[in-house]
């Protein structure tokens, strides 16, 4: 990773870990929630959504995890707040692909804007599950899936 990109990655991860946005918040009127847990490292989060008219009107999360999972959670909530549900599902797919695929097209990275900083997690393969846990939990909340969401395989 280029030094400037690495520095940006580290700065954003540290900032969102130290000062997570939309945390610890359960928005009033929450009508979609999910619980995610990564037993490998102990990351555990609850995502709360207020969805109306096909749009994520409000979002918050609670729980605890490592710096990467907390930062990913914070970045995710900022990105999807106010977004159409279908666009949030598409964003989930793009983020999952950039974190799990070996080669990522530049145009896909461009779609992510600030979230493209998460690509830096790929340098630490054991941490990819930390970064993706909240995204899987978001997807489950949108779809009203029951049970504990896990990135364990």
Image (tube, rainbow, N blue to C red):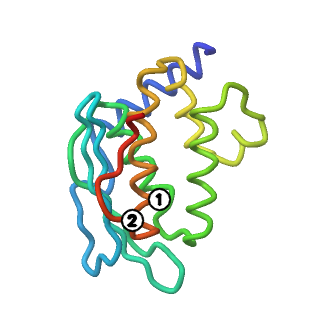
Image height of 89 relative to 65, above or below: below
Residue at 26 percent of width and 34 percent of height = 39
Residue contact between numbered discs 1 and 2, judged by CB atoms under 8 Å: yes
Q: Position of residue 57 (x, y in %)?
A: 43, 75
Question: Mark 1 falls on what kind of element?
Answer: helix
Relative side of 88 to 43, left or right: right
Image height of 111 relative to 52, above or below: above
Residue at 63 percent of width and 15 percent of height = 2
Q: Position of residue 99 (x, y in %)?
A: 57, 34
* CA distance separating discs 1 and 2: 9 Å
> How many numbered circles are shown?
2
Q: Report which residue position mark 1 lands on.
A: 139
Crowd class of label 2 (few under 14; some 14 to 19; many from 20; radius 10 Å): some
Of tags 1 and 2, which is closer to the observer? 2
Residue 145 is labelled as: 2
Q: Position of residue 63 (x, y in %)?
A: 21, 48
Residue at 63 percent of width and 40 percent of height = 97
N-terminal of the two: label 1 or label 2?
Answer: 1
Crowd class of label 1 (few under 14; some 14 to 19; many from 20; radius 10 Å): many
| Quadrant of the drawing holding the C terminus | top left
Relative side of 49 to 107, left or right: left
- Tell me the quarter of the picture where residue 22 sits: bottom left
Question: Mark 2 falls on what kind of element?
Answer: loop
Report the residue that reaches farthest toward the front: 153
Residue 15 is labelled as: none
């Amino acid at each position: 990773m280029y030094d400037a990109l690495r520095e940006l990655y580290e700065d954003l991860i540290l900032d969102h870990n130290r000062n997570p946005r939309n945390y610890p918040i359960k928005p009033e009127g929450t009508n979609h929630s999910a619980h995610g847990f990564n037993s490998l490292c102990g990351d555990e989060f609850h995502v709360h959504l207020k969805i109306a008219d096909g749009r994520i009107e409000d979002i918050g999360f609670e729980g605890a995890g490592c710096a990467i999972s907390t930062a990913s959670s914070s970045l995710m909530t900022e990105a999807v707040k106010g977004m159409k549900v279908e666009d949030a599902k598409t964003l989930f797919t793009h983020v999952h692909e950039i974190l799990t695929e070996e080669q990522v097209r530049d145009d896909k990275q461009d779609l992510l804007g600030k979230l493209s900083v998460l690509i830096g997690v790929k340098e630490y393969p054991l941490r990819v599950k930390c970064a993706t846990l909240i995204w899987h939990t978001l997807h489950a909340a949108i779809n009203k899936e029951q049970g504990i969401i896990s990135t364990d395989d």
